[in-house]
Image (cartoon, grey):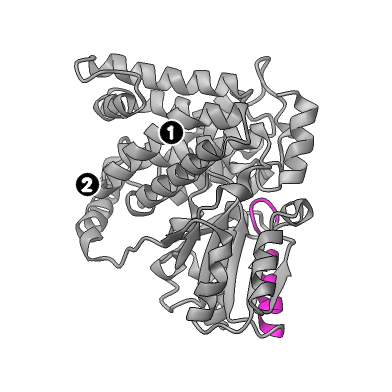
Amino acid sequence: MNHFKKIYCRTFQTGLKIALPFLPYRKPKVVGSVKALPEVIQKKHCSKVLIITDAGIRKLGLTGRLEKALTTEGIPYCMYDKTVANPTTDNVAEALELYRSQGCDCIIGFGGGSSMDCAKAVGARAVKPGQSLAKMKGILKVHKKLPLLMAVPTTAGTGSETTLAAVITDARTRYKYAINDFPLIPRYAVLDPKVTLSLPPFITATTGMDALTHAVEAYIGNSTTYGTRKDALLAVQLIFENIDKVYEDGSNIDARRNMLHASFYAGCAFTKSYVGYVHAIAHSLGGEYNVPHGYANAVILPMVLEAYGAKIHKKLHRLAIAASLAEKDTPSDEAAGRFIEAIKLMKERFGIGNRIPEIREEDIPKLAHYADKEANPLYPVPVLMNAAELEPFYYMLMTDEDTADSSVIKDQEETNVEGADIHDRTGN
């Protein structure tokens, strides 16, 4: 990256960091069960609920407890269940039409990050009917208070239940972009481990590593606060203590609960301190090839951490201590190496490969441009890189003999039914 662009990026990031204490960040109120939502809805005087989810989650019956609770309390609802992995502008338009035609005034995003992001985008369009999603791209373009928005994560990974971001893919161009504004933060986050019990091991692993990526990128960036560092460290500790437990025994409800809380804390960390090039690269791959986001993050994370080099060794040392991989007197470079190696071994245990074979060489300049455009100047990364400097990562991710066949993984992350089928086929 040239000198002048570096100055621009760092100046922009410094300005945001100075502004952090004055911005209206808030954490959603946490409730422990979907059965608590009817009381919230009645208290807020809402008359009809739109539940936004996906077909797999509905087919598994995961929304059943919520539907029963709403019916018991006489609260009318309707459901949009066509959300896809990497939700599109078409998903938002369809759900918005249902919201309007059914006279809804309350939204529940029920599912993985895709369902929650779709719910946020529907809320934004509901209060700004004259503005397209594309015009809300970027930061602070929504402005208006959304209808009552509640989030029920069925995966412990995305952290979308606590963030100010909605990531949407243009249905025609496949360009994936984020809308960031404070009204998008859900009012309530439901951390109910019972809705995660049917999650297959492989999806449990990739979404858990998604949460780990959130915590790590938030922690190693240059715009941390005491609160975000504390949240990120706690998330890393909980993930290292619990991810293998839930991978091996999906019925372990305490470990499931701990992973949900880890995802929540990681979300709280990165919604203030942002992420980095791991996410920028992963988003470009999700938009172009529909590569599941958590899987992409897991594949990319160690290679980007290694590329940052000594610049992040001290911070990785502290993360290694939180993960019980090092002591305070362990040399920083050694602790950093242990942390990165632990991530690689985690991937190996979970059957996550090192390559993403969908990548076409002719697409790499475009993909790197998308990643550059997303990350710079917003993300306060430890080491700045431009599109040309990001291109080598895509070449590293291209197919080779060590590749796990990610084509069988595609579309598994958000849809539990498909994920279960894929888990059976891969034998992981």
Image quadrant in which you'd find residue 103: bottom right
Question: Number of labelled discs?
Answer: 2
Three-letter amino acid code at disc 1? Glu
* Residue 188, image x, y percentages: 47, 65
Was residue 86 drawn as part of the magenta stretch in this picture? yes
| Magenta-drawn stretch, dominant element (helix, strand or loop) | helix
Residue at 23 percent across and 14 percent down: it is 331
Q: Is residue 274 visible?
A: no
* Residue 221, image x, y percentages: 31, 41
Q: Is residue 108 visible?
A: yes
Q: Is residue 127 left or right of residue 1?
A: right
Q: In the image, which disc is placed on residue 163?
A: none
Inter-mark Cα distance, 1 to 2:
31 Å
Seen in the picture, residue 12 relative to 349 is either above or below; the reply is below
Q: Please give the residue where the numbered disc 2 appears in the rendered image.
A: 226
* Residue 120, image x, y percentages: 54, 66
- Mark earlier in primary sequence (1, 2): 2
The quarter of the image holding the N terminus is top left
* Residue 16, image x, y percentages: 26, 57
Foreground residue among 56 and 386: 56
Was residue 139 drawn as part of the magenta stretch in this picture? no
Badge 1 local density, few (<14 within 10 Å), some, or many (20+)? few
Residue at 19 percent across and 16 percent down: it is 329
Q: What's the magenta region?
A: 84-101
Three-letter amino acid code at disc 2? Tyr
Which structural element holds mark 2? helix
Q: In the image, which disc is placed on residue 389?
A: 1
Front: mark 1 or 2: 2
Foreground residue among 274 and 238: 238
Q: Is residue 337 left or right of residue 352?
A: left
Seen in the picture, residue 301 relative to 82 is either above or below; the reply is above
Q: Residue furthest front?
A: 72
